[in-house]
Amino acid sequence: MAPGGLILNTADADVISQILARGNDFPKAVQIYRLISIYGGNVVSTEGATWRYHRKLTKPAFSEENNRLVWRETLNLSQAMLASWVGTRKSSETVHHVARDTMRLSLEVIGRAGLGQAMAWTKSSEDGLESETLEEGHTMSFATALEHISLNVIQVVAALAVFPVWFLSMYPSLAPSRLLMLSL
């Protein structure tokens, strides 16, 4: 017995299969997923009819066709990343931005496979992505926006962990969506 109710830990695949097949009998503790509900309920933080709705929306992202797309994009972008490293290097020069480039690689694969946004690998500058041609009304490219969000989402989650929602609603400047926009 735990403070929030009964907890069962198992590594038995048959037991896990039975539990997952009977979701109504074994509801998930949605309260522990509050921090990942920054913009509302999602497939992880909901149950019942709301979960089924979110699952229906996210199901195409996990299809075999999309898995092939992920592999293809990962290979293409990895080759482009490596070419950008080798193409600009002198024989004794070291690549200093491996972490940033591999994070960008991951984000671009997610952008293509999960969001349908194809992005070409462009050479990175030392301060981040090089400027790209932007459509009117935009201040940053899709790739740059994804990079900024991923680097600053911890601040948003921290605000949700520290301050209760009612407090954040009283101070719009501290609202999670505002903090995320300020980080951009």
Image (cartoon, helix red, strand yellow):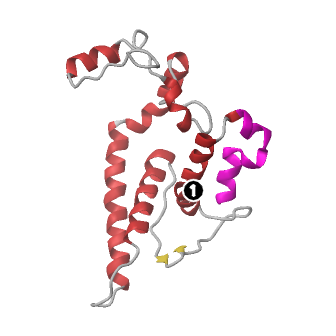
User: Magenta segment, which residues?
Assistant: 166-184
Q: Nearer the viewer, residue 4 or 81?
A: 4
Residue 42: quarter of image: top right
The image shows residue 96, relative to residue 48, as above or below, that is below
Q: Is residue 134 left or right of residue 16?
A: right
Dominant SS type (magenta): helix
74 is within the stretch colored magenta: no
* Residue depicted at x 56% and y 63%: 144
The N terminus: image quadrant? top left
Element at label 1: helix
* Residue depicted at x 68% and y 46%: 177
Q: Nearer the viewer, residue 180 or 132?
A: 180
Residue 129 visible in rendering: no
Q: Position of residue 79 (x, y in %)?
A: 32, 68
Q: Position of residue 28 (x, y in %)?
A: 44, 21
Residue 7 visible in rendering: yes
Q: Residue furthest top?
A: 25
The image shows residue 49, relative to residue 107, as above or below, that is above
* Residue depicted at x 52% and y 53%: 117
Q: Is residue 151 left or right of residue 184?
A: left
* Residue depicted at x 47% and y 27%: 55
Q: In this figure, which residue is indicated by the disc labeled 1? A: 152
Q: Position of residue 172 (x, y in %)?
A: 78, 45
Q: Residues within 10 Å of mark 1 (few under 14, many from 20)?
A: some
Q: Is residue 44 left or right of residue 38?
A: left
The image shows residue 110, relative to residue 105, as above or below, that is above
Residue 176: quarter of image: top right
* Amino acid type shown at disc 1: Asn
Q: Position of residue 31 (x, y in %)?
A: 53, 26
